[in-house]
Amino acid sequence: MPDTEYVLRIKDLRVEYRVREGFVKSVDDIDLDIEKGKFTAIIGESGCGKSTLNNVIMDILSPNAVIGKNSRVFFNGEDLLKLDRERLRQFRWRKAAMVFQAAQNALNPLLKVSEQFLDVIEDHETGEKKRESLQRINKLLELVKLDSRRVLSSYPHELSGGMRQRTIIALALVLDPEFLILDEPTTALDIITQSYIFDILTDIHNRLGLTMALVTHDISAAARLADNVVVMYAGKIMETGDIHSIFNSSRHPYSRGLLNAMPSIEGETVKKKPIPGSPPDLLNKPPGCVFHPRCGLAGEICAKEEPGLEDTGGGHKTACHKWREALP
């Protein structure tokens, strides 16, 4: 039975990459629920497993990836890991779509933008649905604040970086998906263009009521866009909660470290401090809590026992033995 509250439910997900030295544990036995109609941000340092999580959902993992046998990824009650090739093809773009980072690499440089929209529609739709999708193109380009006549007649290199990124957002929406994943959607764009795209994404979310997931290391983007936040570190989920509880009363020392390191136009810069140490080697993770070698609150239990996600009230969950000591 499809869940009425969540569009995506991930259970016991483990993803390892087979390399010469052994297995890199990129996503390590995580559980995650994405609420329908909400904008969820998944944040963390580079290499924490955010993009691997996306790639599992869309089934675009690299050939050396190995998914754990007990892993389950449910989309509206259907396990995506059990879809055959045809069902998977229909799932992509119709049910879930993805906006990739680096817009200059996501569009085919040899085709006009109009041809790329048509390719998606012709591959997935027929008859009445195809006509409806064709009618949506101009409206979607208007939604992302683009001149459809100019954009559709252009090759990707004739558009600016911001225009290409907005084109990709419109392209992802052309088949009216239920779920949109945004993987670092403003990478390599200037700060003014980033802000403009954030405004567009907020408008899309509000107008369409679309379930959206933003994957980013940019905490300010999460603060601006998200309803809910998931904090990842070394393949683990450290903390989840709504945007206000994460930013105003985070329970996990890692989350607080990220916030304390974030630059701000307010206050003294010298008060901003990086998290000491470096992320662990994913080939040989430390025992117990994976964050304990960098944590100022770590005790004996942290080095021995791995904490599970504990409900700390109000739907806020934290994987920390010492979370009460981390409260502001």
Image (spheres, grey):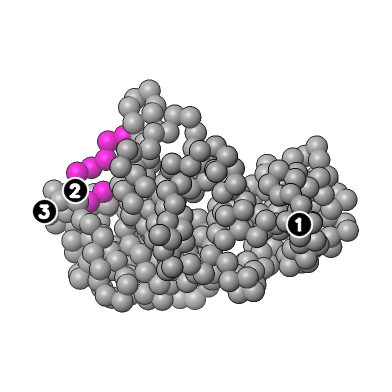
Label 2 with label 3: CB-CB less than 8 Å: no
Res. 116 image quadrant: top right
Q: Going 37% across and 47% down the picture, which residue do you hit?
A: 72
Height in image: 219 above or below 46?
below
162 left or right of 273 in image:
right
Q: In the image, is residue 95 part of the stretch drawn in magenta?
A: no
Which residue: 37% across, 69% down? Answer: 241
- From the image, state whether disc 1 or disc 3 is nearer to you: 1
- Residue 165 visible in the displayed image: no
The reply, left or right, for residue 241 in relation to residue 101 is left
Query: CA gap, disc 1 to disc 2?
Result: 56 Å
**Prevailing secondary structure of the magenta residues:** loop
Q: Is residue 281 magenta?
A: yes
Give the image location of residue 93, x and y in percent: 62, 51
- Residue 230 lies in what quarter of the image? bottom left
Label 3 packing within 10 angstroms: few (<14), some (14-19), many (20+): few
Between circles 2 and 3, the one closer to the viewer is 2
Where residue 143 appears, x then y in whole percent? 73, 67
Task: Tell me which segment is drawn in magenta.
Answer: 278-290
Residue bearing the label numbered 2: 288
The count of marks equals 3
Tell me the quarter of the image containing the N terminus. Answer: bottom left
- Estimate the x, y position of residue 220 in percent, counting from the top left: 51, 66
- 10 Å neighbourhood of mark 2: few (<14), some, or many (≥20)? some
**Viewer-side residue, 154 vs 188:** 154
Q: Earlier in the sequence, mark 1 or mark 3?
A: 1
Residue that numbered label 1 is attached to: 128
**Between residues 230 and 90, which one lies in front from this camera angle?**
90
Q: Which residue corresponds to mark 3? A: 300
Of tags 1 and 2, the one toward the viewer is 1
